[in-house]
Image (cartoon, helix red, strand yellow):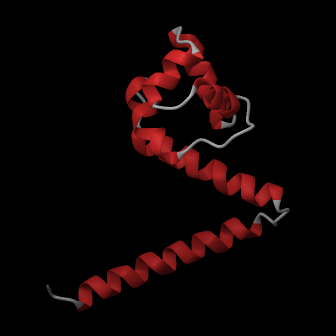
Amino acid sequence: MKQPIGLFIKQLRKEKGLTLTQLGAILGIDSGLLSKIENGKRKLDEKVLPKLAEEFNLDFEELKNEYLSEIIAQKIYSDNYSTKVLQLAEEKVKYFKQKNVKQISLNPN
């Protein structure tokens, strides 16, 4: 999904014929807040992702990845960071995973 998650939610909601009030009730958020999320004026709370995935029959892991990638992209864009940050972050993730594997293998419990 290249579009912001808010627009994606709006598209899904309309395709299913739900009102803002109906989807807001399903997600446990106010319809006004949902409107702001759909229009990019507010950020989606990660806590609603499981309900969103369930309502629209979406893969939860994929939805979480999309959500997090948008947060990272917004941070890089809004603070005018270089995209090199992504490469460095990927290297750090590899390091953390490797370090975690080493710690597990050293602890026989």
Q: Position of residue 72 (x, y in %)?
A: 66, 57
Quadrant housing the C terminus: bottom left
Image quarter where the N terminus lies is top right
Res 85 quadrant in image: bottom right
Tell me where residue 79 appears, x and y as whole percent. 82, 62
As drawn, the residue found furthest toward the top would be 17
Specify whether 78 is left or right of 48. Answer: right
The count of marks equals 0
* Name of the residue lying farthest toward the bottom: 106
Residue 84 appears left or right of 43: right
Q: Where is 81 relative to 19, above or below?
A: below
Q: Nearer the viewer, residue 86 or 52?
A: 52
Q: At 47% across and 78% down in the image, what residue appears?
A: 96
**Up/down of 52 relative to 21, above or below:** below
- Residue at the extreme left of the image, as rendered: 109
Tell me what residue is drawn at x 58 percent, y 18 percent: 20
Where in the figure is residue 75, as x and y percent of width and height?
Answer: 73, 58
Nearer the observer, 9 or 107: 9
Vertical placement of 47 versus 11: above or below? below
Judge left or right: residue 92 versus residue 58: right
- Image coordinates of residue 80 in percent, x first then y, are 85, 62
Q: Quadrant of residue 103?
A: bottom left
User: What residue is rendered at 68% in x and 65% in y?
Assistant: 86
